[in-house]
Image: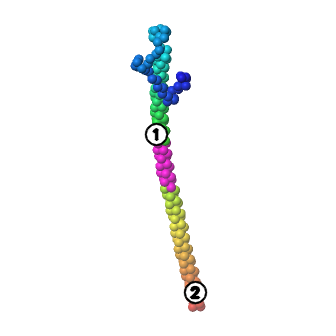
Amino acid sequence: MDLGALSPGRNTSICYEIPVDEVKVRTPRTPRTPNLLKSPNRSVLCEIDLAERLSKADERRSTALKETSTKNEEYVRRAMSKCEQEREKTMNRSLELLENLQEDIEKKAQRRQQVLEERVNAAKKQLEKVEQVTVARSSSKEVLMRQIDEDMSNKENKRRSIIQSIKQHCQHE
């Protein structure tokens, strides 16, 4: 079995049967058997070595998973923090825009009121001028009428006086 083929990302399981009962496992006795029994069994050593390697691989895998999990949690915390900051920034900007809009609306309302007051005052001034012209015309008309009446009455009086004087003059003669 190639250990390089076992990667931490793959789900692999290896099952080994290790006989415990010596009765079941009978090895033929050879002249080399006593020497083999004295030296550690290579297959057992390989199995122990493989078990150690697998346990180390499991430890590395679990360590890598923990590191990845920690990194992911940190990334999520940073992302949430960034989202919260952006949300607060957007909220503050929205409030600022709302305040600016309210100020603009108030300024426009004040300006509108000011323009209306200016128009009302201008209309009042024009009305006063019209009234003054009307009064002046009516007073000048009255004055002219009075002058005409006086002039007519003076002329009439002169005419009468002339007629009276002619009558008197004619009677005296």
Tag of residue 163: 2
Span highlighted in magenta in the image = 91-112
Which mark, residue 80? none
Residues tagged 2 and 1 counted as in contact (Cβ below 8 A): no
Q: Is residue 104 magenta?
A: yes
Residue 170 relative to residue 23: left or right: right
Q: Which x, y percent locates residue 36?
A: 47, 10
Which amino acid is tagged 1?
Glu
Q: Which residue is mark 1?
A: 88
Instruction: Please state which of residues 150 and 91 is positioned toward the viewer in this rendering.
Output: 91
Does 29 lie within the magenta span? no
Please determine whether, in this image, residue 83 is positioned above or below residue 172. Answer: above
Q: Position of residue 5 (x, y in %)?
A: 55, 25
Tell me which corner region of the image, top left, top right, bottom left or bottom right, holds residue 1. Answer: top right
Residue located at (53% from left, 72% from top) = 138
Please tell me whether the stretch drawn in magenta is mainly helix, strand or loop: helix
Q: Which residue lies at the image location 47% right of the left edge and 34% below the top edge?
A: 76
